[in-house]
Image (cartoon, rainbow, N blue to C red):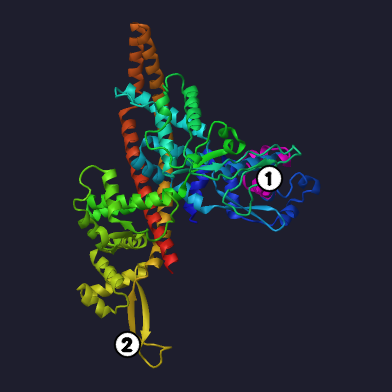
């Protein structure tokens, strides 16, 4: 895992969950699965201190070793203010619970029944890619769905009521701000918009049901002091395991649709949290889409009160987000090469594959066979117009460019999406773009020639790319130095152990996997630099940003007072407040406004660069994943 990823997630935890939780994560990432006996000898704790923590205790093996780390490395943390070891261990339990809520820890049980912790690096990448996932969700499902995903990504796991109440409150604030700016009011109330977005995300498997992580009990309680949190997909833990004194229920149907009872409870909770402004109706309790195909998946009002149902929470489905991001990359690549219509055809085929995956089919390097009639039906359902016009031509173009493959010509043809070949092609194009930026177009011609026909000598390469011997030799040297091209030496002399330059063949080839790994490391370094620069610019202009925030809050209060004065019919007070508002608006001088605008443009450009780098990193990781499966 790159250092930049660890730094980003540590900063995220420090801001959202506190410095103690960030320290727990950082220590476990560096010291995973330490022997418990050695830790006890280092602390020299008496046996009666350890007797409070049985082998099933969640925080047993990590709490003791974390205590020494906090005493040495983190004097400013809250752990140093604790007077007893039990209080420190209780705080450690709370931090571990927060990390488990975000799925950042993997639990494993040793032979002596002790529980150990290690970092879930896949989830670290998910949190680092949160901005890209939010942009993807906003593009495909709208702003309300983006807010739901944002709450779940940054909160780990949330209950249905808490998530919808927060999203509805944010939507109501945005509607109020837009109405004050003389914009048209929203046609649908924020509570219903949040609920419909949540139901759509659950139907498309962007989110899933999870078992809740129970907070730890007080250490002084002899009935148990462990947290009930664990990862449900850990096969070493059974359904009836009791960790501490809390029982965790496995979610049997993580993608079950929202029942009517859940919708009623959610809308009722939103109405209570937002006030009587939210209007509810019986027609809004069910979505306009079709009802679930399986009636057994819906829960009744009585079933919703069962303990295992009450313990359910929701989290973002990282796997589905990755698949959707991959599909978005493929459709945008098809649009840039073949046009919007071909991209629409590919998107329809990807929707069919996604629907089949939701029904239980497995994801692989190649999709299942898609019939021509299914593609036509999907196009007709997704867009208006004649679905058959130009379809065969677009399918042929996609097949020529390696996105799909024609299996047979019966009944209009059967097709298969080639994910591996498409990702390989996009990765090679990305590497070629890097070469073009560094070395020019001639170097790209050399790279493409070696990619198509490997193991060429310099003379053969010169005839292929039509470049002079001197220029070709210089380009080969620079490509070799940068790691884009590799050379193999083949001796033609009898003494092949000690070859001479004039008695050996030098064959040039491209090892795309090795080149991609090197570029991946460079991109992690570039991402770290962009993050450091963005944070440095914010720190440099912190005083000006705080001043703008204070002015904004002052103007907001004055606007509220002006509205109250106008409602009361007090024109004199309203005029005086308006004059005060005009004076407050001038607190930011023109040079300061210009500096803020420059800072905004710089931060926008840096964030766009980070998103582009993250997309290239994701593309290279997909390529390496497919390459390892192919090998």
Kindly indicate the quadrant of the structure image that contains residue 203: top left
Nearest the viewer among 545 and 514 is 514
Q: Is residue 72 magenta?
A: yes
Please give the name of the residue rendered at 33% of the width and 26% of the height, measured from the top-left corner.
187
Cα–Cα gap, marks 2 and 1: 74 Å
Residue 572 disc label = none
From the viewer's side, name the closer residue of 532 and 417: 417
Outermost residue to the bottom: 494
Q: Which residue is mark 1?
A: 242
Give above or below for 476 relative to 73: below
Q: Looking at the picture, how far across and down is residue 450, in whole percent?
A: 29, 72
Magenta residues span 62-86
Image coordinates of residue 519 in percent, x first then y, are: 39, 61
Residue 277 located left or right of residue 431: right
Q: Which residue is mark 2?
A: 502
Of labels 2 and 1, earlier in sequence is: 1
Residue 139 lies, in percent from the top left, at: 34, 42
The C terminus: image quadrant: bottom left
Taking the image as shown, residue 30 lies to the left or right of residue 182, namely right
Q: Is residue 254 above or below residue 181?
A: below
Q: Is residue 124 magenta?
A: no
In the depicted structure, whether residue 467 falls above or below residue 323: below
Number of callouts: 2
Q: Quadrant of residue 447?
A: bottom left
């Amino acid at each position: 895992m790159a250092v930049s990823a660890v730094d980003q997630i540590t900063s995220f935890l420090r801001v959202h969950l506190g410095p103690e939780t960030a320290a727990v994560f950082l220590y476990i990432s560096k010291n995973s699965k330490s022997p418990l006996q050695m830790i006890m000898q280092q602390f020299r704790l008496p046996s009666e201190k350890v007797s409070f923590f049985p082998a099933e205790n969640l925080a047993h093996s990590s709490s003791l070793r974390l205590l020494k780390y906090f005493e040495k490395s983190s004097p400013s943390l809250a752990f140093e203010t604790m007077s007893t070891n039990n209080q420190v261990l209780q705080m450690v339990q709370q931090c571990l619970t927060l990390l488990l809520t975000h799925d950042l820890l993997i639990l494993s049980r040793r032979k002596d029944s002790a529980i150990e912790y290690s970092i879930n690096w896949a989830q670290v990448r998910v949190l680092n890619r949160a901005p890209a996932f939010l942009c993807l969700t906003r593009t495909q499902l709208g702003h309300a769905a983006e807010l739901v995903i944002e709450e779940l990504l940054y909160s780990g796991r949330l209950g249905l009521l808490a998530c919808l109440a927060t999203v509805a409150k944010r939507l109501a604030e945005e509607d109020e701000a837009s109405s004050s700016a003389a914009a048209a009011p929203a046609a649908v109330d924020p509570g219903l918009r949040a609920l419909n977005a949540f139901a759509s995300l659950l139907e498309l498997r962007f989110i899933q049901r999870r078992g809740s992580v129970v907070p730890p009990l007080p250490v002084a309680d002899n009935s148990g002091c462990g947290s009930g949190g664990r990862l449900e997909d850990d096969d070493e833990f059974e359904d009836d395991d009791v960790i501490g004194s809390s029982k965790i229920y496995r979610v049997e149907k993580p993608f079950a649709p929202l029942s009517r009872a859940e919708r009623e409870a959610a809308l009722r909770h939103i109405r209570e949290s937002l006030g009587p402004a939210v209007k509810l109706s019986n027609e809004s309790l069910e979505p306009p889409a079709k009802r679930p195909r399986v009636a057994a998946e819906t829960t009744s009002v009585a079933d919703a009160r069962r303990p295992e149902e009450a313990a359910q929470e929701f989290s973002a489905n990282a796997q589905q987000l990755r698949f959707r991001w991959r599909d978005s990359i493929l459709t945008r690549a098809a649009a840039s090469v073949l046009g919007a219509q071909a991209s629409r055809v590919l998107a329809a085929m990807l929707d069919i594959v996604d629907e089949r995956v939701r029904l239980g089919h497995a994801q692989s390097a190649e999709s299942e066979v898609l019939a021509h009639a299914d593609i036509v039906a999907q196009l007709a359902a997704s867009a208006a117009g004649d679905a058959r016009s130009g379809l065969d031509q677009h399918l042929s173009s996609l097949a020529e460019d390696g996105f799909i493959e024609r299996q047979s010509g019966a009944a209009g043809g059967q097709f298969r999406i080639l994910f591996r070949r498409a990702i390989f092609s996009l990765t090679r194009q990305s590497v070629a773009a890097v070469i073009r930026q560094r070395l020019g177009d001639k170097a790209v011609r050399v790279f493409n020639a070696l990619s198509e026909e490997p193991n060429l000598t310099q003379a053969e390469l010169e005839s292929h790319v039509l470049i002079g011997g001197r220029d070709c030799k210089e380009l080969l040297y620079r490509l070799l130095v940068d790691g884009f091209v590799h050379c193999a030496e083949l001796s033609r002399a009898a003494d092949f152990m000690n070859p001479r330059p004039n008695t050996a063949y030098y064959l040039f080839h491209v090892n795309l996997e090795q080149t991609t790994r090197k570029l991946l490391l460079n991109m992690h370094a570039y991402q770290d630099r962009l993050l450091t620069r963005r944070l440095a610019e914010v720190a440099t202009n912190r005083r000006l940003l705080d001043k703008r925030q204070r002015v904004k809050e002052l103007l907001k209060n004055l606007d509220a007072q002006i509205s109250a004065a106008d409602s009361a019919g007090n024109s004199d007070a309203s005029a005086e407040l308006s004059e005060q508002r005009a004076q407050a608006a001038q607190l930011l001088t023109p040079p300061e406004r210009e500096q803020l605008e420059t800072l905004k443009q710089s931060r926008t450009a840096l964030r766009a660069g980070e998103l582009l780098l993250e997309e290239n990193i994701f593309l290279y990781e997909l390529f390496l994943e497919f390459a390892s499966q192919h090998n």
